[in-house]
Amino acid sequence: MKKRYLLVAVILITLLTMLASKPILKWMYPLYHYDVIRENGLAYNVDPLLIAAIVHVESKFQETNVSRAGAVGLMQLMPDTAEWISQQSGILYQSQTDLAQPGVNIKLGSWYVAYLEKRFNGNRVAAIAAYNSGPNRVDNWLKSGTWDGTLEHLDQIPVGETRHYVQRVLYNYERYKEIYT
């Protein structure tokens, strides 16, 4: 009986060691389109690994993903938001089909993350919340005192989806940093 427990313990330790290995972690946290992500992250002064984490959470790197709400592509941009980004940034965007192209989607999304980080004075947590829930809604939470914009008080965000989204993006961001830096 003791030998069986010892064998089970050895197998569990081996499995846990394998799960913590870089090749397995890279499989669990892929970094597809990294050249495009890196180029746009650097161009807009956003950590490319944050962009990768957003892509991972938004679409799991599925280029042609379309949400029930109509968000499209790797960074799950709404066509109206993409149109607004194009007008503000000068980035070429002509139609919703452009959003299924990784280069266009990542460029627009990276610019938008940079815009949100600036709008919220470098507050990355608020910027991530705004990426999910919209900047006006986050502005309202901050101005009304509903949420103070900190990770410590994430539970104050009145929209459960946004609370969960921020947690998932930050968790994935930490994993990407551990694996790829």
Image (spheres, helix red, strand yellow):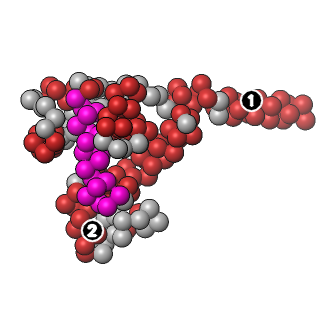
Residue type at numbered disc 1: Thr
Q: Is residue 45 shown to the viewer in this render?
A: yes
Upstream in sequence: badge 1 or badge 2: 1
Instruction: Locate residue 17 relative to residue 55 in the image: left or right.
Output: right
Q: Is residue 119 magenta?
A: yes
| Circle on res. 141 | 2
Asked if residue 121 lies in the magenta stretch, the reply is yes
Q: Nearer the viewer, mark 1 or mark 2?
A: 2
Quadrant in the rendering for residue 54: top left
Q: Residue furthest right?
A: 2
**Residue 145 drawn above or below residue 127:** below
Q: What type is the residue that disc 2 sits on?
A: Trp
**Dot 1 lies on which element?**
helix
Quadrant hosting residue 141: bottom left
- For the point 16% across and 42% down, which residue is it? 89
Q: Position of residue 129 (x, y in %)?
A: 32, 55
Q: Is residue 61 left or right of residue 87?
A: right
Residue reaching furthest to the bottom: 145
- On the rendered structure, is 42 left or right of 16? left
Tell me the residue that label 1 is attached to. 14
Q: x, y (%) of residue 84?
A: 12, 44
Residue 68 falls in image quadrant: top left
Q: Main secondary structure of the magenta part?
A: helix
User: What residue sits 41% from the left and 65% below the top?
Assistant: 150
Q: Residue placed at 44% from the left, 62% from the top? A: 151
| Residue 28 in the image: above or below residue 154 | above
Which quadrant of the rendered structure holds the N terminus?
top right
Q: Which residues are magenta?
A: 104-122
Q: Which percent across, then down, holds residue 46? A: 36, 44
Q: Position of residue 91 (x, y in %)?
A: 16, 35
